[in-house]
Image: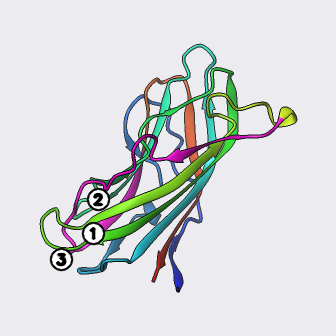
Amino acid sequence: MSQETIVMGATDGPTLTAAARASCIPTANRIVLPNNFFYIGRALKVVMSGRISCAVTTPGTARFDICMGSAGTTIVFDTLALNLNIVAKTTVPWYLEVLLVCRAVGTGTSTTFFPRGQFVSEAVIGSPLPTAGGNGGLMVPVGTPAVGAGMDNTAASALDVFFTQTVATGSMTVHNYQVDILN
């Protein structure tokens, strides 16, 4: 199996503080994949890390989604709601790794991906302090794994990553972002 890095972040993404969905990767790292880029079995690996904060009284949830399609807004992967810690966390590290395996290709919404991944951070609910045992982790997507929304593989596809928090009491910044193609 071969692996090729197709984009590597060299700057931080925006610091997101609103309770709204927004692109979280640096603008320069939004790439466009060519027509017919995927075939069945080809995999896309997205690895990201950064810092996140959450409040003690209203930590809310965090959510990442990977988007493709002509506008880069079709959600092909969604972590679903990641419950944040009820203990206040300020700029603690996080790590997200997602592997998307192409399951079908075609026009319209025929091209789909099956996911597997993990989110690790002290900001995850139930995580002990680092001095008492380290970080918590969640398998993503949270819940039953399933293919995401489909996209058109016969057209060029923009790749973007979005972050959503349910309450405006925290913040999140991407420090490192990498996309690899496998196969």
Instruction: Measuring from the top left, give residue 155's x and y in whole percent.
Output: 19, 74
Instruction: Measuring from the top left, give residue 65's x and y in whole percent.
Output: 39, 49
Is residue 157 covered in magenta? yes
Neighbor class of circle 3 (other Cα within 10 Å; few <14, some 14-19, many 20+) is some
Q: Residue 154 carries which label?
A: 3
- Boundaries of the magenta span: 133-162
Residue type at tag 3: Thr
Residue type at tag 2: Gly
Q: Nearer the viewer, mark 1 or mark 3?
A: 3
Horizontal side of 179 relative to 144 (left or right) equals right
| Residue 27, quarter of the rendered image | bottom left
Q: In the rendered image, which residue does mark 2 sit on?
A: 72
| Circles 1 and 2: CB atoms closer than 8 Å | yes
Can residue 26 be seen in the rendering of this structure? Answer: no
Residue at x 69% of width, y 37% of height = 122
- Pick out the residue farthest to the bottom: 2
| Circles 2 and 3: CB atoms closer than 8 Å | no
Neighbor class of circle 1 (other Cα within 10 Å; few <14, some 14-19, many 20+) is many
Residue at x 27% of width, y 69% of height = 157
Can you say whether 40 is above or below 50 in the image?
below
For numbered disc 3, what is the local secondary structure? loop
